[in-house]
Amino acid sequence: MKAKTVLFFCLVSVLLLSTTACNKNKDTVIKVFVHNSQNNIEPDAFVKVVGDKDKGTAEFYKEEKTNSSGFALINVSEVFKDMKKGDDNVAYFYIYASDASKVFTSKPIRVRAFITNSETITLNK
């Protein structure tokens, strides 16, 4: 009898853990690849991501530098914090990128919630 009770509680615990893990939203990330005008990767480039308030996106601003592989990861999950997985939720941002010259190139991006969104920006020279 005691073994059945322990087994029952173990099964209920596993069931509860598996259902709560499925409801956790994944992060929403923008992966920005930066290339120079010769289409080579641009390590240590400056990347800024700004929410497009004109299209209803919440105020957002974040800066990163590209890594040695020429990309930066920007987590924008806070914009989607009140949204639920399964909804068709999008937000709009502008990406700004520059090398050491501090001349920025910009590009708009449409971002879907709870996935990694990729965009490549080529610097103007």
Image (cartoon, rainbow, N blue to C red):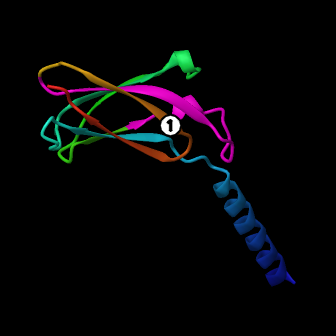
Which quadrant of the figure contains the N terminus? bottom right
The residue drawn where x is 16% and y is 36% is 36
Q: Is residue 75 magenta?
A: yes
Q: Nearer the viewer, residue 13 or 44?
A: 44
Extreme top residue here? 54
Question: What range of the chain is rendered magenta?
Answer: 74-100
Query: What residue is rendered at 66% in x and 32% in y?
Result: 82
Q: Is 12 on the left-hand or right-hand side of 51?
A: right
| Residue placed most toward the observer, 24 or 62 | 62
Residue drawn at 55 percent across, 29 percent down: 79
Q: Is residue 23 above or below residue 95?
A: below
Q: Position of residue 99 (x, y in %)?
A: 16, 27
Name the residue beneath numbered marker 1. Answer: 111
Rendered position, 17 above or below 49? below
Q: Which percent across, then down, holds residue 115? A: 51, 47
Q: Is residue 65 above or below residue 22?
A: above
Which amino acid type is shown beneath numbered disc 1?
Answer: Val
Side of 72 where 88 appears, left or right: right
